[in-house]
Amino acid sequence: MTIERIIEVIKKNNPQADVDLVKLAYEFAKDAHKNQKRMSGEDYLQHPLETAYKLAEMNIDLETIIAGILHDVPEDTDKTLKDVEKNFGKETTHLVEGITKLGTIKYRGLEKYSENLRKMFVAMAEDIRVIFIKFADRIHNLKTLYSLPLVKQQRIARESLEIYAPIANRLGMDEFKSVIEDLAFPYIYPEEHKWVLKISKKRFEEQKRYIKKIIKVVEKELREKKIEIIKINGRPKHYYSLYKKLLRKEMNIDNIFDLVALRIIVKNIDDCYRVLGYIHQLWKPLKGRIKDFISQPKPNGYQSLHTAVFALEGRITEIQIRTKKMHEEAEFGIAAHWDYKNKQDKNKEKFGIEGKKLKWIKELLDEQKKAQTTKRYLNTLKLDFFKNRIFVFTPKGDVIDLPENAVPIDFAYYIHTDLGHKCVGAKINQKMANLQTVLKSGDLVEILIDKNRKGPAENWLQLVKTHLAKNKIKLYFKKEKKLSIFKFFNR
Ligand code: MN
C-alpha cells in the first residue's frame, strides 16, 4: 500500500479535499514506525496504511483517515498522544486515543463477552468513527493472521466472529461484517471451511457464467423501458454466510438459490419498483420470495427489493434491486451517513447522522451526556443497547441475536424446528433451567429434548417472544387440528 493510492481514493470521492495533512500524517507515522516490522515480515507502516485505505474507500472524513494512519503510534512507538495532538489537533487525537483504549479488549471466554461489548459501545458512543477505524484495523490484522502463533490466531479470529461481526451487523455494515467473517472462518472452523470451498467451487463458476447471460437480457429489457442502470452485477455469496445457510438447508447446496444473486442498482425508488415489475413480466416469480425491504426495512436499516424468479432455462435466480444510496448504506451502514458535506455544515449535529433507524445511537449519546459517572453510564448503556436485543451463545460458541425477554423455547426454534417441538428444558450457563427462564446477554444455552415429545404446549404461545417461534408453534397446531378432524371423520 502506498500513500499515493490512498490520496487517489480520497480525491476521487472529494476532489476538493485538502490532503496536505494526510501527507504529513504519513511522514509522521513513517518516522515513528521506522525499523519496525510486522510478524508477517513486512514494514510496520503497511498496517496503518492498509487501515487508512479501507477508511478512504468508505468515503469517510479526513480526520478519520488520518487517525487511521496514526492509530498505532502512541501504543507501539516512542511518539505520544501529545505529539499527535501538537501536529494534528484535538479531533484526530481523540480518535487515536479511542483506538488505543479499545486495544485492551481481549476475548477471554464468556464472562468477558458483555464487558467487551460494552467497552465497544462506550467508545462508539463517544465517537462512532472509532469503531470504523477499529474495523479497518481488524480487517488487516485478520489478513495477516497466518503469521501469528496459533493461540493468538484463535483468540483474534474468535473475537472477530463473535464480537466484531455481530456489531458490524447491528450497525448495518454488511460489507465489513462479511469480510470479517470470511477472514476468521478458516481459523475457527477449518474443516467446515475446506468443505464449503470444495462443494461450492464449480457451482460458483458455473453460476457466474449464467448470471452474465441474465445480465444481458435484463440490460436490453431495461434499455427498452428507458430505465437507467447505475450498476448491474452478480453478487457471489460470502463463504461464511453460505456455510450458515447450508446448516439451515440440510447441508445441501442444491437448496441454495442465491449463490450468485443478480444485483441491480438504479437511480431512485420509483425505478426500483418499475424494474421489479418488468422483471416479473419477463420471468415468473417464486411464491413467497418477493420481499419489499424498501417499505419495510430490516431492523438494522437495510433496504432493497428482493425477488426470486424462474429465469433463463427455468433456473431459480435471486434478484436484488436498490438505489445507489441504499447500496452504500447496505455496505457501510451508518458510515454511509458520514457525509463529507454534512460535516462541513457546522449547524448539523456533530455526527451528521440522520434518520430514525439510527435513533438508538442518538439515544446512547444523550444518555452519555446525562450520566455523570462512568459507572452510571455503563449501567444506562447496558440498558439502552440491550433494550431490544440480546446475544446468547450456543454450546459451540456461535452467537445468536434474540429480542429481549426471549426464553429458551425461542432459542430452540431459532436453531431448528424439531429442537423447538421436542424441547423440555434447558441448561443455562451449565445450570438446569426451565423453559420460561428469561435469557440474558452472554448466556450459554443448551436445549434439552425428549425424543418422544410430539410437539409444543399450547401455553408456549404466551411465553415466546420471537415471531419465528410463534409461527412454528401455530403451524404445528394448525396441522394437528386438520389431523384430528380427519381422525374424527374416519372413526
Ligand atoms: Mn493496528
Image (tube, grey):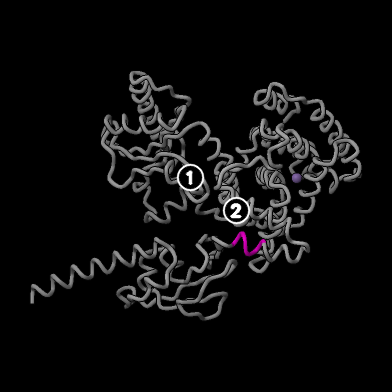
To which quarter of the image does residue 266 belong? Answer: top left
Mark 1, other Cα within 10 Å: few <14 / some 14–19 / many ≥20 = some
Task: First in sequence, mark 2 or 1: give its number.
Answer: 1
> Looking at the picture, which amino acid does disc 2 mark?
Trp
Give the vertical position of 247 relative to 19 (above or below). Answer: below
Q: Which residue is mark 2?
A: 360
Q: Which quarter of the frame holds ligand 1?
A: top right
Q: Position of residue 337 (x, y in %)?
A: 61, 38
To which quarter of the image does residue 442 belong? Answer: bottom right
Q: Which residues are magenta?
A: 381-386
Tell me, yes or no, whether the highlighted magenta stretch contains residue 198: no
**Residue visible at 8% across and 73% down?**
490
Q: Which residue is mark 1?
A: 197
To which quarter of the image does residue 343 belong? Answer: top right
Give the vertical position of 47 relative to 389 (above or below). Answer: above
**Residue visible at 43% across and 41% down?**
294
38 sits to left or right of 200? right
> Looking at the picture, which amino acid does disc 1 mark?
Leu
Question: Total number of numbered labels?
Answer: 2
Give me the C-alpha separation between circle 2 and circle 1: 38 Å
Q: In this orientation, which residue lies closer to the viewer: 448 or 264? A: 264
Q: Is residue 214 visible to the viewer in this orientation of the structure? A: yes
**Predominant SS of the magenta segment:** helix
- Report helix, strand or loop for mark 2: helix
- Report helix, strand or loop for mark 1: helix
Q: Position of residue 436 (x, y in %)?
A: 46, 77
